[in-house]
Image (spheres, grey):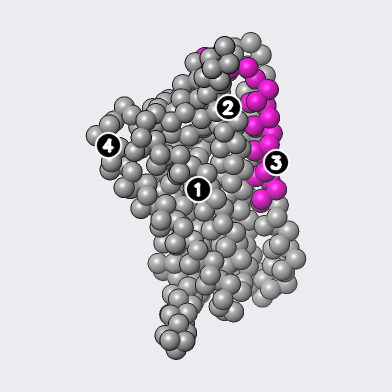
Amino acid sequence: MKANHSSAERFLLLGFTDWPSLQPVLFAVVLLCYLLTLTGNAALVLLAIRDPRLHTPMYYFLCHLALVDVGFTTSVVPPLLASLCGPVLQLPRGGCMAQLCASLALGSAECVLLAVMALDRAAAVCRPLRYAALASPRLCCALASASWLGGLANSAAQTALLAARPLCAARRLDHFICELPALLQLACRGGRSATERQMFAARVVILLVPSAVILVSYTAVGRAVWGMRSRAGRRKAASTCGSHLTAVCLFYGSATYTYLQPTHSYNQGRGKYVSLFYTVVTPALNPLIYTLRNKEVKGAALRFLRSLGRGQ
């Protein structure tokens, strides 16, 4: 009886077993993206800490984004790699809930943090003379803390509501992680609608409110850039804001598809590929997006390498 009960409490994550020939390729791609995420974000944080020229609000928030990305992808990749080179992944209920809680907390924190970064860019472009006073260290610390706390609050609320619902369907997910929409499809029908409405409202808040902040911020940025007479000023504003907008589109596009569609219409087969993009690929791309056209980061990297050369 105990063995049967223990087995019933486990979740079977089928992952990509429906494409066995694709698994070795996916393993290599996921591992490469994970290594790029770790090295790229670690290098970005190291440069921002060591170089005094990067001690600005923009790079302060970038460091927080890098830490969120590393934690976010780490909550997903190790079990994914295990499932790609072994048997079907089985997670106990507690492990599944822990993974859900961690990924939701970090993903939600990234939503809020991207909105905070949009506000920072709007203040820098629209109020350049008052920017230093507006973006004080105390305010930056408060906004970064609010991002983390907002992510934790959303995750705690969503996980608690889901954990309170009994699951009637077989604990079998056509997915590689314990994704919230996939888990909701296992919930019993009785009383499910009320819980789903509450959880959907929480997801709307964590996704659409930051989206509205980003939209308003970049509307203000667009107006300010349009009124600039200097081409150099326009180029500088476009380079700093363009990187952030690219990261926003990559993350919000896939996250909105996953979390803002009705549970009954969520397709796990398609959803796992979308989830793979925003949990594995996007965190690996973010360091490249923010550094490829960034002269300040490139300069900091060159100074760091020269200091290492002199040290030897």
Relative vertical location of residue 26 with respect to residue 16 in this rendering, above or below: below
Residue type beneath disc 4: Leu
**Mark 1: amino acid:** Thr
Mark 1 vs mark 3, foreground winner is 1
Residue, disc 4: 22
Disc 1 residue crowd, few under 14, some 14–19, many 20+, Cα 10 Å: some
CB atoms of marks 4 and 1 within 8 Å: no
The mark that comes first in sequence, 4 or 2, is 4
- Which element is circle 4 on? helix
Is 193 in the magenta?
A: no
Identify which residue is drawn at 55% across, 78% down.
51
In the rendered structure, find residue 93 and report the number of the disc placed on it.
2
Residue drawn at x 60%, y 62% as measured from the top left: 61
Q: Label 1 belongs to which residue?
A: 74
- Mark 1–mark 2 Cα distance, whole angstroms, equals 19 Å
Most extreme residue toward the bottom, as rendered?
Answer: 310
